[in-house]
Every structure is written in C-alpha cells, then in structure tokens.
Amino acid sequence: TGVPIVTLNSDAPDTGRLAYVGLDNYRAGRAAAGLMSLALRDGGTLLPLSGYTENTSHTQRMKGFFDAVEHEFPKLRLLDLKHCYDVDAIAEKIVDNALKDCPELAGIYISGNGQTGVCRALRRFQKAGKVCVLCFDLTQGNVAELEKGSLDFILDQNAGAQGYRPAMLLYDKLLLGEE
C-alpha cells in the first residue's frame, strides 16, 4: 500500500510494518510466572485474569505465563483463565467468586486491566497483602495500590516510549527518508 506502519503495544507482524514498539509480551508473561514463583516459594493456587481474548498483548502474556508455570514451576496450580474485558466491576466479581470457591487462593496474575476491582475484592475479603497480585502498567492507580499493599508487582511497559517512539520512527521515515 505504500503507507508506512508502526505498531505499538500489540504487534501485528503480518502487516509489513516498519517496526513494533512494545514489550515482548510472551517473555513478560514468563517473567511474571518467575516472579510469582519467587513470591510463592511453597506454591499455591493462582487465578489468571485477562482483559480481552482478541488483544494479542493479553493473550501472549497469558501464553508465556501458562507455559512457564506448566514447564518450570510445578508448585503453582492454575485455575481456569477468566476474562474481565478490562472492566473493574467484572474483575471484582471474578475475584469475589474465586475467593468463595477457592479460599486458599495464593495469587492473581492480571495480564490486562481490572486491577482496581481486584484490589477492592481482596480488601473486602481481608485478603489484601495475603494474596500475591502481579499486574502490568505503572499508573498512578496501580502505584497507589502497591503502596497500600494490595498489589505486589507491577511490570512496566514504558508507556511514554510506546507513545513517543512510533511517531518519531514515522517522522524519520517520512521526512528524513530513514529506515
């Protein structure tokens, strides 16, 4: 088509894009599993919580997490994957149900959004700080939850670079002719 494309946050390698700016989401999921394993040395039951099934970032993070848990961390046991569609109220309800069905829940891995709802549910069940929670995005809300002790780990995507770098790559291509 002759139109230069730069993808960000979620890659689309089959588009013929010039570049992708973002995480290696599969490896980020594997790293999340490693962190969870370190936090839960004795193992435990985990709730995997994702946003959208269509979001490749979320699905790649989950795939990396599931693969690492399955092959490297046998003490961790996964509940069925749930989707909250990045809606806090849905995430809250999912965690409510998980805590009722699995009171021994040891960890929650969030590959998308819904952190505020997760934290509300944990506080209501008096499980904040007792259930290890790992999520993405270094936002003010997530940092506040980390400081309160409701979140244990935040994996940063460097959103500033993801917003700035694609525009600069396109500028370099279109105005300077640089690849």
Image (cartoon, rainbow, N blue to C red):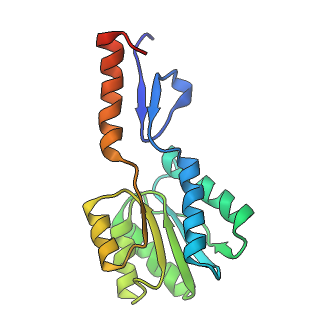
Which image quarter: residue 80? bottom right
Q: Is residue 164 above or below residue 150?
A: above
Return the x and y of residue 85 as percentages of the image width and height.
42, 57
Q: Residue at 44% across / 63% down in the picture? A: 135
Q: Quadrant of the N terminus?
A: top left
Left or right: residue 87 versus residue 19 is: left
Return the x and y of residue 152 as percentages of the image width and height.
43, 73
Q: Is residue 156 above or below residue 94?
A: above
Left or right: residue 178 versus residue 104 is: left
Return the x and y of residue 127 as percentages of the image width and height.
43, 86
Task: Judge by depth and name the residue closer to the eye, 58 or 22.
Answer: 22
Return the x and y of residue 126 as percentages of the image width and height.
39, 90
Which image quarter: residue 2? top left
Task: Judge by depth and name the residue closer to the eye, 152 or 86.
Answer: 152
Q: Residue at 49% across / 47% down in the picture? A: 57
Q: Quadrant of the C terminus?
A: top left
Q: Residue at 30% across / 66% down in the picture? A: 143
Q: Residue at 53% across / 48% down in the picture? A: 25
Left or right: residue 75 versus residue 36 is: right
| Image mark count | 0
